[in-house]
Image (cartoon, rainbow, N blue to C red):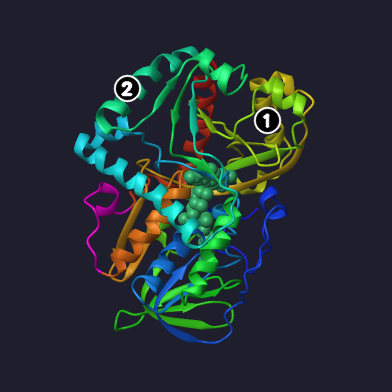
């Protein structure tokens, strides 16, 4: 599998990886590779949610001439293969940690922005009439042990008191009676406004909306290299043609090839996340597991598991995976996810896996994403740390505003660039160390 930390080329016109989403989505967008030289006001690299949302805003709201260059297919990266959790937040810091780091006023601004991100996703779905199987709202943050459970009432109260957010604490018995018979769940906090979607259908919808607004979208057209001209404009090289532009937006995030933009490469660690999808649960299995609802679920482990019931009663179950791209397809990873699922739901012991795939999320050094003008005329957004479905859509809005010279809200993530990792060559070693520590913590602490 392509590994952005070591590979300098991502590939050209690769098909979508096989996944449950590909088998359950009509992918009918008309696109082709760029075959002739052209000029464009602004070029966006990468047709995931970030790039498509940005391009859509630039064309629709600001009436600019926009070209999107995508190496493979629209939504080929994370955007077409994620778990479809539309969550409130990005990066790895919750509101309590944001309050500690930046103070309550800034944390309230984060909360507002993350709420705006969910609203923007809903707005896009409604405006584009996107059929992406939105499920009824609700996300459960589930305590995986008793000490995590003991912290949840205070967390829910903090969200209600300081942010006016209707987080709901659920005791172990409420959780078991109303939501699931999970042997590893000790309490939960319910976040009322998060919901599940088909992520590939959403990406396809964004691509269609961008095209209908006048965006020129070229798939199968990787940016291989780029240079600055004397006048500050950019010259971009793709396999068959070159493009000139005044402004350049890099929306390649966790899939950014090594060397494409070294300042970004040094500040982002691509980390694999993997998903399994089981066969559909029978009515008896649904009854026994209590999984009658479609709430999104994520636990409190250091190495988190996340899961949801899909519209056809299968379980999507995900978590961390291999460290290196070359190991991503090894059978041990889906087997580990399945055994974690069965440890939660012993009554599902007979369940089989029907799909497995992985993707690269972009982890930032300080656990926060960024949207910025990295140097004159060159913009990027990234570092969502695996929580980027809703935020990438909002990041696209903010990138477009930034490119149009509009001042962004005074949030730290909009006022600085991604922080380079110290000793970037040792990032994978650090990741392996973190996984060892995480396994120990999740088991014993
Ligand atoms: C398994 C998995 C599960 C996840 N689940 C969730 C979830 O449930 N909820 C959530 O909030 N987040 C989730 N995420 C993270 C979320 O999917 C991402 O944060 C989000 O999709 C990022 O969107 P993006 O547009 O920034 O990047 P991407 O969607 O990764 O898009 C980047 C694009 O850039 C293209 N590209 C790269 N290099 C070049 C080049 N040189 N030239 C042209 N194009 C190039 C790639 O082909 C790719 O299409 C998950 C991620 C994974 C992998």
Magenta includes 409? yes
> Between residues 24 and 273, which one lies in front from this camera angle?
24
Q: Residue 279 sits in which quadrant?
A: top right
Q: From the Cβ of disc 1, is ligand 1 less than 8 Å away?
A: no
Please indicate whether residue 329 sits to the left or right of residue 371 in the image. Answer: right
- Residue 260 position in % (x across, y down): 46, 64
Q: Which residue is mark 1?
A: 336
Q: Label 1's element?
A: helix
Q: Earlier in the sequence, mark 1 or mark 2?
A: 2
- Look at discs 1 and 2 and give the one toward the viewer: 2
Query: Is 110 placed above or below 69 here?
Result: above
- Structural crowding at the residue carrying mark 2, measured as other residues with C-alpha within 10 Å and reported as few (<14), some (14–19) or many (≥20): some
**Mark 1 vs mark 2, CA separation in Å:** 35 Å
Instruction: Identify the residue position indicated by label 2 in the image.
Output: 157
Magenta segment, which residues?
405-417
Number of other residues with Cα within 10 Å of mark 1, as a class: few under 14, some 14 to 19, many 20 or more = some
The main secondary structure of the magenta stretch is loop
Image x and y of residue 266, in percent: 41, 53
Q: Is residue 139 left or right of residue 356?
A: left
Whether residue 399 appears in magenta in the rendering, the answer is no
Query: Where in the figure is residue 370, as x and y percent of width and height?
Result: 34, 52
Q: Residue at x 54, y 24 (%)?
A: 439
> What secondary structure is marked by label 2?
helix
């Amino acid at each position: 599998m392509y590994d952005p930390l070591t590979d300098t080329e991502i590939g050209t016109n690769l098909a979508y990886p096989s996944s449950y989403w590909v088998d359950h989505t009509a992918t009918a967008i008309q696109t082709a590779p760029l075959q002739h030289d052209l000029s464009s006001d602004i070029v966006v690299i990468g047709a995931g949610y970030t790039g498509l949302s940005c391009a859509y805003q630039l064309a629709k709201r600001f009436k600019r001439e926009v070209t999107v260059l995508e190496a493979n297919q629209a939504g080929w990266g994370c955007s077409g293969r994620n778990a479809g959790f539309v969550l409130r937040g990005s990066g790895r810091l919750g509101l309590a940690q944001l309050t500690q780091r930046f103070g309550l006023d800034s944390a309230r601004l984060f909360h507002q922005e993350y709420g705006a991100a969910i609203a923007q996703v809903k707005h896009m779905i409604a405006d584009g009439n996107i059929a992406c199987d939105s499920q009824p709202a609700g996300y459960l943050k589930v305590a995986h042990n008793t000490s995590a459970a003991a912290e949840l009432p205070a967390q829910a109260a903090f969200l209600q008191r300081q942010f006016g957010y209707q987080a709901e604490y659920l005791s172990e018995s409420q959780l078991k009676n109303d939501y699931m018979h999970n042997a590893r769940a000790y309490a939960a906090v319910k976040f009322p406004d998060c919901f599940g979607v088909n992520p590939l259908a959403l990406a396809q919808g964004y691509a269609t909306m961008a095209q209908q607004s006048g965006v020129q979208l070229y798939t199968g057209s990787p940016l291989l290299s780029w240079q600055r001209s004397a006048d500050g404009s950019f010259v971009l090289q793709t396999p068959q043609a070159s493009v000139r532009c005044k402004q350049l937006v890099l929306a390649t995030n966790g899939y950014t090839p090594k060397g494409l933009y070294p300042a970004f490469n040094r500040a982002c660690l691509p980390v694999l996340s993997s998903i399994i999808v089981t066969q559909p649960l029978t009515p008896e299995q649904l009854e026994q597991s209590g999984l009658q609802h479609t709430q999104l679920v994520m636990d409190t482990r250091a190495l988190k598991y996340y899961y949801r019931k899909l519209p056809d009663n299968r379980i999507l179950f995900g978590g961390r995976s291999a460290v290196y791209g070359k190991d991503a397809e090894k059978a041990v990873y889906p087997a580990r996810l399945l055994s974690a699922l069965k440890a939660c739901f012993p009554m599902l012991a007979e369940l089989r896996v029907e799909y497995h795939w992985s993707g690269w999320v972009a982890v930032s050094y300080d656990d926060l994403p960024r949207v910025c003008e990295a140097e004159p005329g060159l913009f990027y957004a990234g570092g969502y740390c695996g929580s980027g479905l809703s935020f990438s859509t909002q990041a696209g809005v903010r990138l477009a505003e930034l490119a149009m010279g509009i001042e962004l809200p005074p949030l730290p993530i909009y006022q600085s660039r991604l922080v380079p990792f110290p000793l970037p060559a040792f990032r994978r070693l650090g990741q392996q160390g973190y996984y060892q520590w995480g396994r120990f913590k999740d088991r014993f602490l």
